Amino acid sequence: MLFSTRTVTNLGLLTAVSIVLTRVFGIGVLLGGVVSLRLTFGELPIMLAGVLFGPWAGAVVGAMADLIGYMINPFGGPYFPGFTLSAALTGFLAGAMLGKQREYTWRQVGLMVAVNDLVTSIALNTVWLVMLYQLDARVILPARFGARLLTLPIYSTILLLVARAYRRSEQR
């Protein structure tokens, strides 16, 4: 898994953008007295890394964005490696589902985002929140699911447009 200097630079940039979108522009929503829902676009650069550079690159960007982002702004909570695993899996799944294709349809990208959200945001992150804060999953799941339904078309559209633009710029 050797990366060129250009690829490492792009991955570093995507990591930084993810940190800024998550830690600076993220909005936390309290459910059950705990921030159990964060509205943010920080997953977009992680998924984009997986789609453009492969699953392992996406996993590295996800893990690094979570680790470095936590050091910059922990949101008042303890570090929990489950969230790092979820972030890494976000990039890995995106790359595994779409990584080697040159062209994508909105349906393919939408399916990838939906599967990614179901596995990481709705399933795993809910489990981590229940483990950490002893919350009732029945209380936080509806809001988490609703937020994912709202972000699905937005994520899919942005990912599709940016991936296509990047692929076109590569050809020049």
Image (tube, rainbow, N blue to C red):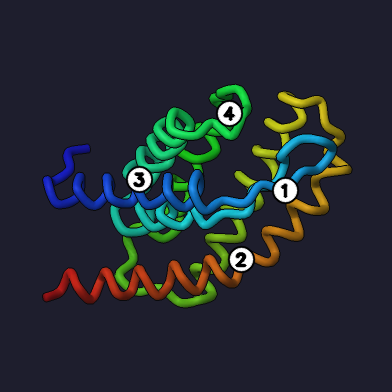
- Alpha-carbon distance for marks 3 and 2? 21 Å
Q: Quadrant of the C terminus?
A: bottom left
The answer to whether marks 1 and 3 mark residues whose Cβ atoms lie closer than 8 Å is no
Q: Secondary structure at mark 1?
A: strand
**Residue 98 percent across, percent down from the top left:** 41, 60
- Looking at the rendered image, the disc whose residue lies closer to the viewer, 3 or 4, is 3
Amino acid beneath label 1: Val
Instruction: Answer above or below: position of 50 versus 60.
Output: below
- Alpha-carbon distance for marks 4 and 1? 20 Å
The residue beneath circle 1 is 29
Which of 125 and 54 lies nearest the eye of the viewer?
125
Give the residue drawn at x 50%, y 70%: 108
- Give the label on residue 82, or none: 4
- Give the label on residue 152, or none: 2
- Alpha-carbon distance for marks 1 and 3? 24 Å
Give the residue drawn at x 75%, y 55%: 145
> Which label's residue is closer to the chain start, 1 or 3?
3
Around disc 1, counting alpha carbons within 10 Å, would you say few (fewer than 14), some (14 to 19), or many (20 or more)? some
- Alpha-carbon distance for marks 3 and 4? 18 Å
